[in-house]
Amino acid sequence: MMQSKHPSLFRIVLLLVLLLVLARCQPVTLPSTPVAMNKPTLSVTGTATFPQETPVAAPTTLGSWPLSPDRRFMVAQSSDGAWWMWDAASKKPVYLLNDTITRAPPLHHPTFSPDGHYLAAISVGHVLLWDIASHKRRLLRSPYAVEYRSMRLLVYSSDSRLLASNGCERQNSHMVCTGGFVNLWDTSDGSLVRTLPVGFRVEEIVYSADGTTLTASGCSITDGVIGSYCYEKSQATYQIDNGELITLTRIPQYR
């Protein structure tokens, strides 16, 4: 029997398929350094470091966020919910105000002092006070029970030496504050100077022009059900240096 002088067509096709498979299976070389995620990191000292591009979207409208008196800094949330101190001109973050970027307690009512040295905010029933230049933060703890939802007032004296905050010590059955007080804090060291036992729900705090007295105003008698209607408003004026009550004015409210 005579053998064929040429390989069969099947063998040729099989060889071509093998060559194509081997060419597709060449190893892929991966970079030795993983691609870094575009997020800031925090050092042990709490100083934030940033990649070349800012990882969060800066606010675009200055008027919508608290500005320092000299308009150098502003406080605003980034796109991930964290609170930062921002450079108002460049829209670049300066330092992180929350403890961590994710799942940090929110900040409420951030307020700069008149001299621009301090920033205060309310977080989960406490007052936080920052020294803007040093980035140092203090936690101001009230010695009295505080219902954190009623805390919303942070008022500095004209010389920025004192910070007044409201608190609640009595509620009705619907968790509405019916009795409150005012704390006076020393901004230089965060110490509690004194507590003014106002006795009614504090809705406004005003210092006198000369800075010697403080007046707290608010509702002293509500409808007793949900607190939606105030039957009596009161104003209490105190001497700041000794905490003495000077005047107490009650103003009935009519429908």
Image (cartoon, rainbow, N blue to C red):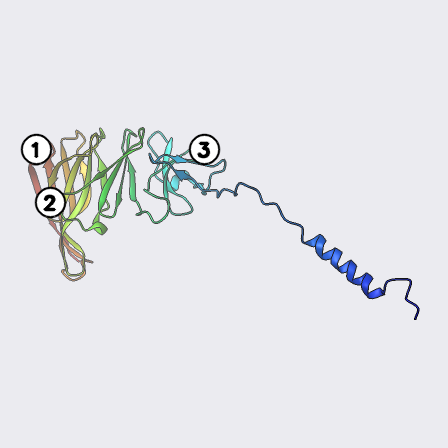
Q: Disc 1 on helix, strand or loop?
A: loop
Which residue is rendered at x = 28% and y = 28% of the image?
115
Q: Quadrant of residue 243?
A: top left
Residue to which mark 1 is pinned: 242
In this image, 41 relative to 216: left or right?
right
Q: How many marks?
A: 3
In this image, 152 relative to 38: left or right?
left
Q: In which quarter of the image is the N terminus?
A: bottom right
Q: Where residue 190 appears, x then y in whole percent?
A: 20, 34
Task: Answer few, some or many: residues within 10 Å of disc 1's Cα (few below 14, many 20 plus, some between 14 and 19).
Answer: few
**Residue type (three-letter) at the residue carrying disc 2:** Val
| Outermost right residue | 2
Residue to which mark 3 is pinned: 90
Mark 2–mark 1 Cα distance, whole angstroms, equals 15 Å
In this image, 17 relative to 92: left or right?
right
Mark 3 vs mark 1, foreground winner is: 3
Viewer-closest of 76 and 16: 16
Task: Answer few, some or many: residues within 10 Å of disc 3's Cα (few below 14, many 20 plus, some between 14 and 19).
Answer: few
Viewer-closest of 70 and 167: 167
Q: Where residue 55 appears, x then y in whole percent?
A: 46, 41
Between discs 3 and 1, the one toward the N terminus: 3
Between discs 2 and 3, the one toward the N terminus: 3
Which residue is rendered at x = 81% and y = 63% of the image?
11
| Image vertical order of residue 172 relative to residue 53, above or below | below
